[in-house]
Every structure is written in C-alpha cells, then in structure tokens.
Image: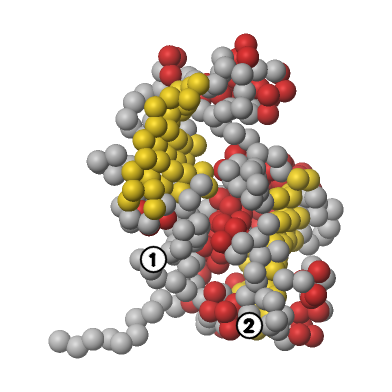
Amino acid sequence: MRYRNDMSPEPRSHIKTLMRIGYDFNSAIADIIDNSITAKAKKINIICPPEIDNPFLSIVDNGIGMEPEELIQNMRIGCKDPNQKREAGDLGRFGSGMKTASFSHSRRLTVISHKKGKKLAAACWDIDEIEEKNAWCLRELNEKDIKDLDHLDKDLIKGVGTQLIWEKIKKFEETDHNNSKNSIETSMVDLNKYIALHFHKFLQGPNKINIYVQQLKIDPVDPFLTTKKGYQEGPSDETFVRGGKLQIKSHTLPHHSNLTQSEIDNIGGMEEIYKGQGIYIYRENRLIIAGGWMGLSRTYQLGKLARIEINIPSGLDDEWSTDVKKSSLQLPQKI
C-alpha cells in the first residue's frame, strides 16, 4: 500500500465547483454581512450603481478591520476549522463564506481592510486568472495599487474597517434577455427586504447596527409584530446547551383588524402573513429559517397567525446540521 501525498483538486476545475455551491444573491450578501457583524461593525453600506457599463457591488463596514497577514489568511478558502469553538455572537463557521458567496456571483473579488495602527491591506481573487494559470494565484496589492483601485472607499485610508468589491457580476451583465439597470434595481429592492427581515434583531435596540442599501437606511421587519396591538406572547422555554442558551418562544400575531394598511404592506400583505406561519429559527440572532413547519405539521387555516421562534447558539451547528451557506439546517430529533 502507498499513499499519494497531494491529490488536491485542479484549481481550474475546483473553482467551477465553488461557483455553484448554491448561494442566491441575497444569501450571498447575508454571508458577507455576517462577517461585518462579527467584526463589530456598527455601520454597513452596500452600493451597486445601476447606470454604469461595468457594474460593481461594494460592501463597506466600519468594523475592526484586518492587518495584512490576517487578510491574506482570511482570503484562503477554508481558512478556519468548522469544529473550532467560536465566541458567542460569531456568525461565521466554515471559513469559506466570503469567498464562496462572492464566487457564486462575481468573477473578481477584491477585499481592502484597515486595522487601527496597521498598514492598509488588500488582496484580489480573479477567476479568469485562476483558470488561465490553473493555480490559486491570489493577487496581493501594495499601497499604490490600493489607492489606484477604481472603486476604493477613500474613508478606509484614514479610518478602520473593511471593503469588499465584486466585479464581473454575471447577474448584472447586459444581454439581449437581461437589462442591467433593471436587474440591479430589482435586486437591490429585494435585498433591502431580505436584510430587513433576516437581520431585524440587529437593526434595533441600544446596540443596533445601521445597514444601508443604495444609501437608504434599512428599517427592521419584525415577523412576530410584537409591538402591535393584539399581539399575544405564548409559552417559552430556555435551556442551557453547549455554547450558550437554546431559546424557544411562541407567538400569535395580531388579527388584521388591529393593523394599519401600511403595517400590513410592510410585511408583504395579508397573504404573506398567512403563508408565514410556522417555525422561525435564528442562529446567534440571525434569522435562518423563516416560516414553514419543517415536516412537523401542515399549513392550516387556524395556524395562520401562529409562529414558533427558536434561537440557537453557533455551538450547536454540528447537531443542527448547519450548511455552508448558513441558509438551512435540520431539527434534531429530540427537539
């Protein structure tokens, strides 16, 4: 018997696999927002100008940033052990999200970061270069390269934080069947709604984070309507588990007669409210599963206002089978 010491996949083939992991546009952006929140950002700004020939998307946060070697390490795919214990509130898991989410929608990923007291750092993955050279050739930018970047957020030079830039975005390419401007505008509206719901716990309260899409501040959408007249809080349960607390709460939404038309419209109309019955699962306060009964029950008329909220710590990722995209998981049998 003998072992082959290096059977790593060819970069040219492997990158095509990573591009098809299955992120939709909103879940890809959400994975990057997770990183900003973990980096203690209080402001995140997402911009995608709709009226330029070569569209780009920029995500800028004012988190703690990364020094040069830290950035290079984080540009590595699978840079962290998924079984490694995470701090409470750390929304990461596999060390691949930023890269795989980006590769799913853009062919060039540039990350610029500035940590207090450290040099400005930047690096770039270009899928065209990877395929041409059949090598994991990460481009590390020097200070002049960084300042010459077309879409650099100049505030990073003197401040702290991280900017991520997507270029060569397939979804926004102008074709006979796709109008780039309309595609960008529609995607940004959908993204706003997605963030308002899935990050609503972060968009409110004394330690809230401000997230902007196309310069518009996102207001949270509470799927339980807890502050509205007629809301009913049901039984709850709290259990100490590995990595923190597992919380289960039940909610009954207000009858539509207690809501204004603008409140109904804000959550998508009565049809969406009725369809949203079921289980809402949060991972470290970030919404992962939004409604549905996950095989425990069927959608039924009497349950249209019923919601069950489950909040799990990241320490239970293995037990709950959290996927790479952090967009699905499975209920353990004992739950």
Q: Judge whether residue 279 can be spotted in this image.
A: no
Residue at the image point whose x is 67% and y is 76% from the top? 115
Side of 134 where 269 appears, left or right: right
Residue in view at x 69 percent, y 68 percent: 161
User: Can you say which quadrant of the picture contains the N terminus?
Assistant: bottom left
Of the pair 181 and 72, the residue shown nearer to us: 72
Q: CA distance from mark 2 to mark 1?
A: 24 Å
The residue that disc 2 covers is 68
> What's the mark number on residue 126?
none
Q: Quadrant of residue 141?
A: bottom right
Horizontal arrangement in the rendering, residue 330 relative to residue 50 (left or right): left
Instruction: Check disc 2 and give the amino acid type.
Output: Pro
**Do residues under tags 2 and 1 come within 8 Å of each other at their CB atoms?**
no
According to the picture, the residue beneath numbered tag 1 turns out to be: 85
Res 125 seen here: yes
Give the mark toward the camera: 2 or 1. 1
Q: Nearer the viewer, residue 266 or 236?
A: 236
Secondary structure beneath dot 2 equals helix
Position in image of residue 138 (x %, y %): 59, 81
Three-letter amino acid code of the residue under disc 1: Lys
**How many other residues sit within 10 Å of disc 2, few (<14), some (14-19) or many (≥20)?**
many
Q: What kind of element bears circle 1?
A: loop
Q: Is residue 126 above or below residue 198?
A: below
Which of disc 1 and disc 2 is earlier in sequence? 2
